[in-house]
Image: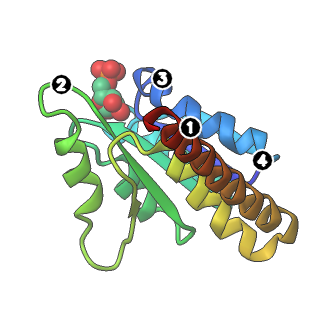
Amino acid sequence: MKVAIIMGSDSDLNVMKTAIDMLKNFGVGVEVIIASAHRTPQKVHDFVTGSDAKIFIAAAGMAAHLAGVVASYTTRPVIGVPINSEPFKGLDALLSTVQMPGGIPVATMAVNGAKNAALFAMEILALQDDDLAKKLIFYREKMAAEIETKNDKLKEALL
Ligand code: RP5
C-alpha cells in the first residue's frame, strides 16, 4: 500500500471515490479508512503511526482538523481535501485545513479536490517510480488531446 486515504465520515466518500478510483486506475495501492479527528482521535493516531503508507490523503468537512492532526503524527506528506458541506459550502473546511501553523505542513487541495489529491500524491510517488511518471505524462497528453478535440468541435459548430 502506498497511499492511505482517511475520511472523517462516510459522508465524504461520495467526493473521495474519485481519488480512490484514480489511484486504482493508475495501479497505485490504496487503503481507505474512516477515522475522525474529533469523534475517533485515538483511531487516527493508531492508524497513522502504524501505517506503511508513503503518503496520506485526509478528507474532512466542517471544522476539518483531520489533515492537520494526521500531519502531527507523521513526517510523510499529507494532502488535505476540504469537503463541501452546509452551511458554509466548504469554506470552513478549507480554512481549517489550509491554515496550518508553521512546522506542520498540509498540502491543501481545492474544496472537493479529490482528483488533484490523487494526482498530486502520484506526482510525489513518481519521483521514485519511472513507470508511474510515464503514466502521468500520458494522462496529461490525453487531457490536452481532449481539449483540442473540444476546440475543433466548437470551431465546427460556430462556422
Ligand atoms: C466531518 O464532519 C466529516 O469529515 C464530514 O465531512 C462532516 C460531517 O460528518 P457527518 O455528520 O456527515 O458524519 O468530520
**Residue located 67% across and 52% down the image:** 145
Is the distance from the Cβ of mark 1 to the nearest ligand 1 atom less than 8 Å?
A: no
Q: Which residue is disc 4 drawn over?
A: 26
Q: Please state which amino acid type lies under the numbered disc 2.
A: Glu
Reading the chain from its start, which is encountered first: label 1 or label 4?
Answer: 4
* Number of residues whose C-alpha sits closer than 10 Å to that of mark 4, classed few (under 14), some (14–19) or many (20 or more): some
Q: CA distance from mark 4 to mark 3?
A: 20 Å
Q: Where residue 140 appears, x then y in whole percent?
A: 66, 59
* Number of residues whose C-alpha sits closer than 10 Å to that of mark 3, classed few (under 14), some (14–19) or many (20 or more): few
Q: Which disc number belongs to residue 153?
A: 1
Q: CA distance from mark 1 to mark 2?
A: 38 Å
The label nearer to you, 1 versus 3, is 1
Q: Which residue is disc 3 drawn over?
A: 14
Q: Which residue is disc 2 drawn over?
A: 86
Q: CA distance from mark 1 to mark 4?
A: 29 Å
The label nearer to you, 4 versus 3, is 4
Q: Are marks 1 and 2 in contact (CB under 8 Å)?
A: no
Reading the chain from its start, which is encountered first: label 3 or label 2?
Answer: 3
Is the distance from the Cβ of mark 2 to the nearest ligand 1 atom less than 8 Å?
A: no
The local secondary structure at tag 1 comes to helix
The label nearer to you, 2 versus 4, is 4
Is residue 57 left or right of 149 when viewed as pictured?
left
Reading the chain from its start, which is encountered first: label 1 or label 3?
Answer: 3
Q: Please state which amino acid type lies under the numbered disc 1.
A: Lys
Q: Quadrant of residue 100?
A: bottom left
